[in-house]
Amino acid sequence: MPSIETAAPQLLVADLDASLAFYATRLGFTTDFVYEAFYASVSRDGVPNELVGRGAPILEPLGERPWGMVDFYVEDPDGYILCFAERAAAGGD
């Protein structure tokens, strides 16, 4: 039976070129590939707080949450709200 080991959300966008430009310029992602005119992948290592300087529309600033995560929220041009998160260091380090 097929299974998925890791998750990579797929978002339907109105304008692929505009979305790729947003993810590159505002969020610092690199385009991995573009398939025809409707499908693409972006990625990046680390997500430092430099996004504010890039003009990214931050909805919730970087912070440690009571549920043990460090995260922040960004809204993309299609209105998707993206949460970038990782587990907080044990002991608040």
Image (cartoon, rainbow, N blue to C red):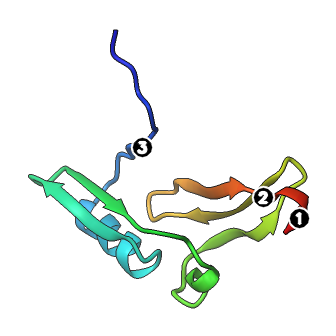
Tally the marks: 3
Q: Position of residue 76 (x, y in %)?
A: 49, 63
> What amino acid type is highlighted by mark number 3?
Ala
> Dots 2 and 1: beta carbons under 8 Å?
yes
User: In this image, 68 relative to 46: left or right?
Assistant: right
Instruction: Tell me what residue is drawn at x 90 percent, y 52 percent.
Output: 66
Q: Secondary structure at mark 2?
A: loop
Label 1 to label 3: alpha-carbon separation: 28 Å
Looking at the rendering, in which quadrant would you find the N terminus? top left
Q: Earlier in the sequence, mark 2 or mark 3?
A: 3
Q: Nearer the viewer, residue 21 or 69?
A: 69
Q: Where 89 falls versus 9 (above or below)?
A: below
Tell me the amino acid under the disc marked 2. Answer: Ala
Above or below, 53 relative to 9: below
| Within-10-Å neighbours for mark 1: few <14, some 14–19, many 20+ | few
Of marks 1 and 3, the one in the foreground:
1
Work out whether residue 2 or residue 13 is closer to the camera in this orientation and state it: 2
Q: Is residue 62 above or below residue 85?
A: below
Q: Which residue is mark 2?
A: 88
Q: Name the one closer to the observer, 16 or 14.
A: 16
In whole angstroms, how far apart are the C-alphas of marks 2 and 3?
21 Å
Kindly identify which numbered label has been placed on residue 8.
3
Q: Position of residue 69 (x, y in %)?
A: 77, 54
- Tell me the tag on residue 92: 1
Q: CA distance from mark 2 to mark 1?
A: 7 Å
Quadrant where the C terminus sits is bottom right
